[in-house]
Image: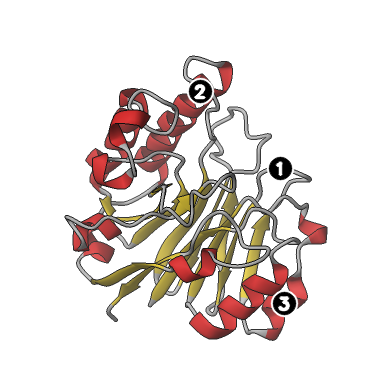
Amino acid sequence: MRITTWNVNSIRAREGRVKAWLAAAQPDVLCLQELKVEDAGFPHKLFDELGYHVAIHGQKSYNGVAIASRAALTDVTRGFGDGGDDEQARMIAATTGGARVAALYVPNGQDVGSDKYVYKLEWLARLRRWLDAHADRGAPLALCADWNVALGDLDVYDPAAWQGKNLFTAAERTAMGALVDWGLTDTYRHLHPDGVEYSWWDYFGVSFFKNRGLRIDMILTSPPLTARLTACTIDREARKGKDASDHAPVTATFSD
């Protein structure tokens, strides 16, 4: 089974690129973030033609997540379901191919100390509570996300310059550490302990061409899926060219 996570930064703007990539890569499951479209405006036909079932949690102009799978999607849930603020479409989960899969779009946080930064930390804390309430460490689980957090120095092109800035603060890494402590594994770092690859590059300047990026798109898995992990790759080529998202797809492969 091959699971991909990809922040497409507007499914309408990237529709052609997503179609071409899907036809070539053919993952079993594709988790999408930042759709920027309501459910009715999602390009259902594209996925139907390529043989994918889709579950969507859309939102006009902002946010939005979806799961596309070759196998049927069951037990679809949207949001945390904890009675808190779920107005932002940032989480959808479903069972497919014998695994529970969630597509997540973690809040960016904007500026350290701002209301949006506080909201980001609380959102990650809610995710940990959701794991405690609804997930099973002993069952296959994959959290596929634009986490908007770089976990370590190898995940940032200039750690000294980024230290203490949004996306690379101690508080954000601590919040992510709580998810890892629950029993999740970063699939890329598990297989590439010394790897230096990025999944996001700023549109401005020459960030991509100078490889000034961050690795903030990750697939985190529970022990049963981690035990089956055989590969994890970042498709940098998908970031190249006209109308590309500023994020690259990340794909984890699991044995049967």
Q: Can residue 178 be seen in the rendering of this structure?
A: no
The residue at 47%/77% (across/down) is 28
Q: Do the residues under discs 1 and 2 have CB atoms within 8 angstroms?
A: no
- Sequence-first disc among 1 and 2: 1
Residues packed near mark 1 inside 10 Å, few (<14), some (14 to 19) or many (20 plus): some
Q: Which residue is mark 1?
A: 62
Q: Position of residue 84 (x, y in %)?
A: 58, 27
Residues packed near mark 2 inside 10 Å, few (<14), some (14 to 19) or many (20 plus): some
Q: Position of residue 218 (x, y in %)?
A: 39, 54
Q: Position of residue 215 (x, y in %)?
A: 38, 49
Q: Position of residue 109 (x, y in %)?
A: 52, 28
- Sequence-first disc among 1 and 3: 3
Q: CA distance from mark 1 to mark 2?
A: 17 Å
Give whichever of 133, 87 is nearer the camera.
87
Measured along the vertical axis of the image, is residue 92 above or below residue 46? above
Quarter occupied by the C terminus: bottom left
Q: Which residue is mark 2?
A: 117
Q: Can residue 226 be seen in the rendering of this structure?
A: yes
Q: Is residue 215 left or right of residue 146?
A: left
- Sequence-first disc among 3 and 2: 3
Give whichever of 198, 81 is nearer the camera.
198
